[in-house]
Amino acid sequence: MAKLAVNVDHVATIREARGIDAPDPVLAAGIAELAGADGIICHLREDRRHINDRDLKLLRETVKTKLNMEMAAVDEMVEIAISVKPDMVTLVPEKREELTTEGGLDVMARSAHYSEVVGRLHEAGIKVSFFIDPDPEQVGAARDCQGDIIEIHTGHYAEAESEDEAEKRFERVIRAAQTASSVDLGISAGHGLNYQNIKRFKKLPLVQEYSIGHSIVAMAVLVGFEKAVREMMDLVKAF
Ligand code: PXP
């Protein structure tokens, strides 16, 4: 049975839109775990645009399942990870101007650097996942750098504008998963997955875990909205 790890970044995005302390991604993580989530993910970005250092620290103290810290493979983040000790780290490319992570990591292009980063994280007892495009060569590079897991970037699949295109892009995801399985890497998938496009993955049991954030937060805003309005109505109508 596949696992679901819930990314709480966008709960923090809503908080940051007001610059106050609600909604709290740490509380959201607890609720996600109560709902059965197998893990919690947060991305500590260099610009701290959503998750901040306090969130990461509290998540480490409170998450009971598995905490996955997404981060760029830079010294500052490696040092934070070694001190906070999430259960695992997912290495992602990071550009300041992007709205969200745009592409997979080019592991081949900087394999000596990534090997060194993996070595430092492993020494601290932290597993390492590489977020990569569905490209068998990148899978091989992730293996060569001693990665434990790959997370297949499903963003291109999710953005396909026709069924045919989606199927073609999904074939690439299948091939990447098969390559990863043949070299004994753990296999996750994520980015842009929602309540519709995830259905195709029923055909791909090789994927062990899904990393999903935005669509869950978006659904929560809608399905929780009625309750939230009713509760405020009850208060106001009692005046
Ligand atoms: N995986 C990685 C590596 C990501 O950077 C993100 C976005 O933060 C996700 C998964 C989750 O993507 P989404 O928010 O579109 O579900």
Image (tube, rainbow, N blue to C red):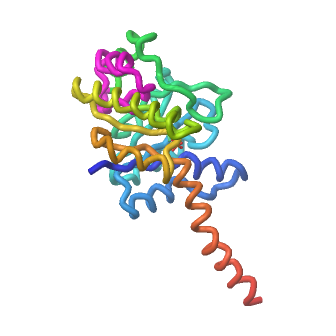
The reply, left or right, for residue 25 in relation to residue 6 is right
Furthest-front residue in view?
164
The image position of residue 187, as x and y in percent, is 32, 35
Against 201, residue 228 (above or below) is: below
- Camera sees residue 123: no
User: Which of the pair 142/17 is nearer the observer?
Assistant: 142
Q: Residue 13 location, x and y as percent? A: 63, 47
Residue 136 in magenta stretch: yes
Residue 134 visible in rendering: yes
In the image, residue 169 above or below residue 6 = above
31 vs 206, left or right, is: right
- Camera-side residue of 170 and 144: 170
Residue under the image location 59 percent in, 30 percent down: 46
x, y (%) of residue 28?
A: 50, 58
Residue visible at 45% across and 10% down in the picture: 109
Q: Where is residue 206 drawn, in percent x and y?
A: 28, 38
Q: Which residues are magenta?
A: 122-151
Q: Residue at x 63, y 58 (%)?
A: 22
Q: Quadrant of residue 91?
A: top left
Residue 220, relative to residue 179: is it above or below?
A: below
Residue shown at 41%/12% (left/top)? 108
Q: Give the position of the C terminus as an image quadrant.
A: bottom right
- Seen from the viewer's position, the closer of residues 44 and 108 is 108
In the image as oriented, which residue stretches furthest toward the right? 239
Residue 234 lies within the magenta run: no
Tell me which corner region of the image, top left, top right, bottom left or bottom right, holds residue 232. bottom right
Number of numbered discs overlaid on the protein picture: 0
